[in-house]
Image (cartoon, rainbow, N blue to C red):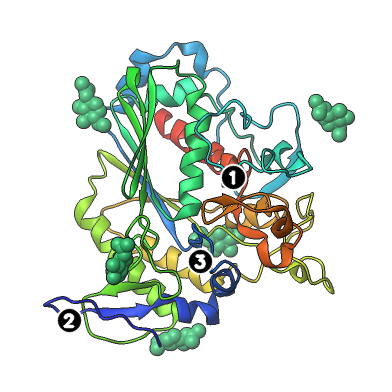
Amino acid sequence: MTNIIQSSSTRRIQYSILRAALASILLLGAARLLFDELKNDDESFLWRFWWQQGSGLNERISTGTADKDFEDEEDIEDCNVFEGKWVWDNVSHPLYTEESCPFLVKQVTCQRNGRPDPYYQFWRWQPNECNLPRFNARKLLEMLRNKRMMFVGDSIQRTQFDSMVCLLQSSIPNGKKSLQKVPSKKIFHAQDYNASIEFYWAPFIVESNSDHSTNHTVVKRSITHPDDVREYNVTTAYKMALQTWANWLESSINSQKQKVFFMTLSPTHLWSWEWNPGSDGNCFGEFYPIKVPYWGVGTSIDISRIVQDTLRELKVTYVNVLNITQLSDLRKDAHTSVYTERKGKLLTKEQRADPTNFADCIHWCLPGLPDTWNEILYAHLIQEAWI
Ligand SMILES: *[C@@H]1O[C@H](CO)[C@@H](O)[C@H](O)[C@H]1NC(C)=O
Ligand SMILES: *[C@@H]1O[C@H](CO)[C@@H](O)[C@H](O)[C@H]1NC(C)=O
Ligand SMILES: *[C@@H]1O[C@H](CO)[C@@H](O)[C@H](O)[C@H]1NC(C)=O
Ligand SMILES: *[C@@H]1O[C@H](CO)[C@@H](O)[C@H](O)[C@H]1NC(C)=O
Ligand SMILES: *[C@@H]1O[C@H](CO)[C@@H](O)[C@H](O)[C@H]1NC(C)=O
């Protein structure tokens, strides 16, 4: 096993999540084999963000925004927005385009990178029992006035951050918005609102040997723990990591002022035999979402249970779980596939012709699926504003 002992006066344990991941969360292991050389080959493990309130939300909303803005509100309070279906809607979606968002990175601009079909952009998530409210950038900016919204996690989380920036930026005039990159962070600032939307690189959300923004190991990725030097299987390691995080929440979050969301695992589509028995491809060449109820092999019930148990045991902090795993599992069509970059360079024609080795079935195109995650997040934030 590949334990890296850190030089530290206190004894530290490094329990490798990765090796264990090969056993229980298959997607992590395969991701590593396929994307060893990838620059941003951070697999989705777990991620969350917290939202810091500077001042009273209700007060701000009642004074800051015209009533008519709220007329089209959809009520999601008694509705499980994560149960539903994907419907074709090329009228309301996508919510922005590659051309209209100057902040998109080339890792995700699939159209520009040569993807022949535009279909993945035209799907809208339709919950069974309610409608998601229409994303209103000005309304969200008003809610975020004098606040920070921070996305913490890995590259999947970063894509959600990029999506949020694109969703918001079009309602802010040039010169009144900026995107800043500092090590481990990306910060979007909306001047007139004194609002910042931030991404913070912390792939395991607890201390790990992969926390440096550029110089992070992939093969030997592990998290640090202050007890002793031991290895644990992935479920145990995950539980310990989440518990460490939960303890931090309990001692550090002021629920009056800070709101915490936890995003569940982002699924992968590395093996087409999962949804198309007998085939041996991956997400490459997939043009449509899966229509039938579907659970990928990477969607671990154990992990879900750990999340639920850990969060249920919290005493002072309330964490809102955004359970996007299942709805995303259906979107085998929404990955960047070969229309992306590797080591900072777009794939060459030859590499694109070799999807077996080069398709990225972990990350997602923008505009695309992560916009839906943000539409759901938006629905929750708007809902909160009413309570
Ligand atoms: C939207 O989709 C419908 C049904 O596939 C198609 O007939 C129509 O041309 C599309 N409209 C646009 C603007 O792409
Ligand atoms: C601007 O926003 C920050 C939070 O990001 C807050 O601490 C600060 O008080 C705000 N400034 C004003 C003038 O309200
Ligand atoms: C990257 O990190 C490793 C391990 O911490 C260190 O030995 C190495 O010098 C670092 N490389 C650079 C270019 O900073
Ligand atoms: C992981 O380890 C724990 C504690 O040693 C054990 O109870 C559990 O069954 C193991 N899980 C797997 C999937 O091996
Ligand atoms: C997410 O939703 C799925 C399907 O509804 C459920 O089985 C799973 O337990 C949920 N996970 C969490 C962490 O709530």
- Marks 1 & 2, CB-CB < 8 Å contact: no
Label 3 secondary element: helix
Q: Residue furthest left?
A: 9
Left or right of residue 246, residue 45 in this image: right
Mark 3 CB lies closer than 8 A to ligand 5? yes
Graded by Cα atoms within 10 Å as few (under 14), some (14 to 19) or many (20 or more), the crowding at tag 3 reads some
Horizontal and vertical percent position of residue 60: 32, 20
Residue at (59%, 25%) from the top-left corner? 100
Mark found first going from the N terminus, 1 or 2: 2
**Mark 2, residue position:** 11
Residue 188 x, y percent position in the rendering: 38, 33
* Residue linked to disc 1: 108
**Sooner in the amino-acid sequence: mark 2 or mark 3:** 2
Tell me residue 279's x, y (percent): 83, 71
Q: Closer to the camera, 288 or 155?
A: 155
Name the amino acid type tagged 3: Ser
Q: Mark 3 points at which residue?
A: 304
* Residue that appears at 53% across and 69% down: 36
Q: Which residue is pictured at 79% across the width and 57% down the height?
A: 292
**The residue under label 2 is which amino acid type?**
Arg
- Describe residue 190's horizontal placement relative to residue 75 as left or right: left
Residue 37 seen in this snapshot? yes
- Is 136 located above or below residue 336 in the figure? above
Q: In this view, does 332 lie above or below 151?
A: below
In this view of the protein, which residue sits in the foreground, 18 or 299? Answer: 18
The first of marks 3 and 1 along the sequence is: 1
